[in-house]
Structure formats: C-alpha cells, structure tokens
Amino acid sequence: MEILPIHSEIVAYLKKHNLKDKFNKQLRLLRNDLRHPSLGVELLEPKNLRFFSFRVDKKYRAIFIFHNREIIEIIDVNNHYR
C-alpha cells in the first residue's frame, strides 16, 4: 500500500500535539495491514463518501481516502472527542 506525502498542515498539527512518533508507527501498520487491530480502521458516515479513519492513539484519529484501492491519502488528523 502506498501512502501519499502528508500535507504540511497535518505535519504541523502532529508536531504541535506531540503525535509524530505515534502517527508514523500507525502509518507503518497501515501500509502493511489495514486490518491490524491497533488501527481500528472504520468507514465513516455517510458511507457513500468512502472516508475512512484509523486510530493514532486513544484521543486522535486520522481521516483518509483511497485512490485506486492501492494509494492512501491522509486528509486530516483530529481529536476524536471534539
């Protein structure tokens, strides 16, 4: 699985919230196995838009989309409980 380069605003958010190492670990898991239990990948509502998320940690999730089923683009990282 290929992951597109992360947008600079997302990188800045990760640095600000001290999530860079956790995020990179989860990206490695995502690249190797979408079904890894610690990722908790889920299809978001409304399902027809095909937005997915995975856990960065207990508080934060990353939102992503697929391009051609083999390329992932991370479009956001946010506080899951806000």
Image (spheres, rainbow, N blue to C red):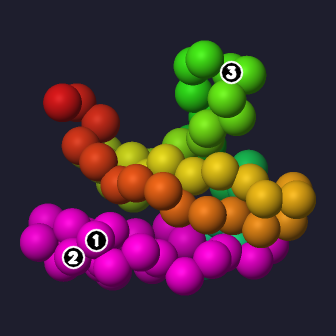
Which of the numbered marks, if any, corresponds to residue 74?
none
> According to the image, label 2 marks what residue?
12
- Kindly tell me whether residue 61 is visible in this rendering: yes
Q: Residues within 10 Å of mark 2 (few under 14, many from 20)?
A: few
10 Å neighbourhood of mark 1: few (<14), some, or many (≥20)? few
Residue 68 x %, y %: 88, 59
Residue drawn 77% across the image and 68% down it? 71
SS of the residue at dot 1? helix
- Mark 3 = which residue? 47
Kind of residue at disc 1: Glu
Residue nearest the viewer, comparing 72 with 81: 72
What x and y, as percent, mark residue 30? 65, 65
What is the quadrant of residue 19 in the picture? bottom left
Query: Could you tell me which residue is drawn at 47 percent across and 76 percent down?
Result: 6
Bin the neighbour count of mark 3 within 10 Å (Cα to Cα): few under 14, some 14-19, many 20 and up: few
What amino acid type is highlighted by mark number 2?
A: Ala
Which one is in front in this view, the residue at disc 1 or the one at disc 3?
Answer: 1
Residue at numbered disc 1: 9
**Disc 2 secondary structure class:** helix
